[in-house]
Amino acid sequence: MWHTMRTAVVSIADQRTAAVAAGSAGSSDAVLAELSSQLFGSLPRSDQRRNGSQYLEGLLSVEGRKSIRNIASAFGIQANEQSLHHFINSSTWDWRSVRQALCRYLLRTAPPQAWVLSPMITPMTGQQTVGVQRRFVPAMGQLVNVQHAIGVWAGSERMCSPISWRLHLPEEWLADPARRRKASIPDDIAAESLEACMVRAMLELAGWQLPVRPVVFDARALDAAQVVLPLAAARRPLLARVDDDVPLLSVESLTRGGTARPLRASQILSGVQNMRRLVAWSDDGTPEAKRASLFTAVRVRMLTSRPQSGGGEGRVAAGGELMLLGVGQPGRQWPAQCWLTNLSGAAPGALLQLGRMVDRVAWSATAIGDEVGIRDFRGRSFGGWHRHVTLASAAHAVTALAQRTPDRASNVS
């Protein structure tokens, strides 16, 4: 198992060599032409292929919000708004096959170093768009109407681009038969937690035969055990940033006959400050981006809540061993970051670089994703949302491949 985990960490040098061998992406027009032929070639009808190409081009060229009306108006009488509306909201073409075609294209042109799970929160003015719920958003500090989705991104030091999405549907959308029928939500979609949504977003790609790469994500503000443990049980190599107060059991303490009392991650790492060492690593794989961080690793086990025989809930150890990573800077509060991983054989520098994928994706989601309108869908249709974000993901890939701007992501703090 651990050999498989180690092979999942592909060196940055190997990633760059593969990308160079694939050839330069060239201009966005060249990428658009090549990608369109591969994405829409499998669509059975000529009008679907035409609408797909026009919608994708509109996402890349239309100013302002990428609504169906704005995209249709960009093509004048050649593109009928009603036809595009049907193509997105109620057509029969399968967005999953288009996503797989997009993924295959990215595997050839921009081989990923990691699969990154990243949330996408979209504020809304009303509650009519599919999946919208009024909830408290910590980053905004208030109750707002938001739509919440989880994206699976192909990430490397050269570029990051989404390949698949899972929409989180609140209970009120699924328990109301009329609302569910109007949104055409499939019968097999059931209520799930945000943590379960994140796990399934990754595991539902099992049939895609993706190359083994670490799954990287930020589990802060979530029940980290509900994401980390299922992915680890599915034998996925992973690296997860966690809150410093996540409860853990130190394997070293148990081995020495010490207390089995759960401790916060920060407490465990504070107790091993003498084990810290300064690790040099490259933020984007180049000598110019060299950094140095304090680093240490401790073997731990996660805890999860389970009902006790006498009633109530108790915390019990679950899953196998993980490595708790502490990261910080000399002279500053320790630890600055806490991470969990099952990549026990990976070099510290490689793990530090992998962790930066979370920031790279966040940067790319704003700098490119918002520009191509990935959060611009307004409509009740469940399938419509999926088709829109699928084509917006393709537009994201076109832009990212043409620009190849990894150095900008390095400026994210």
Image (tube, helix red, strand yellow):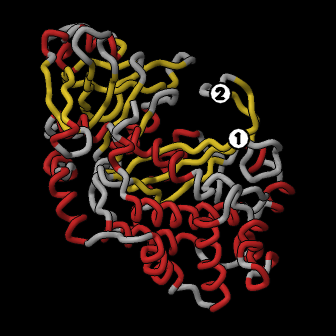
Left-right relation of 71 to 327: right
Q: Is residue 235 visible?
A: no
Residue 140's disc number: 2
Task: Give the percent coordinates (x, y) of residue 303.
Answer: 39, 24
Does the CB distance between marks 1 and 2 fall below 8 Å? yes
Percent from the top left, x then y, of residue 60? 58, 65
Say which of 399 and 297 sits in front: 399
Percent position (x, y) of residue 144? Answer: 74, 32
In this picture, residue 371 sits left or right of residue 36: right
Q: Amino acid at mark 2?
A: Met
**Amino acid type of the residue tagged 1 in the rendering:** Pro
Residue at 66% over, 80% down: 51
- Horizontally, residue 151 falls left or right of residue 112, namely right
**190, above or below 351, in the image:** below
- What is the quadrant of residue 358 in the picture? top left
Residue that lies at the very extreme toward the right in this rendered image: 178
Q: Quadrant of the C terminus?
A: top left
The CA distance from mark 1 to mark 2 is 10 Å
Secondary structure at badge 1 equals strand
Among the two numbered marks 1 and 2 on one chain, the one whose residue lies closer to the N terminus: 1
Q: Residue at x 31, y 37 (%)?
A: 355
Reading the image, the residue beneath label 1 is: 123
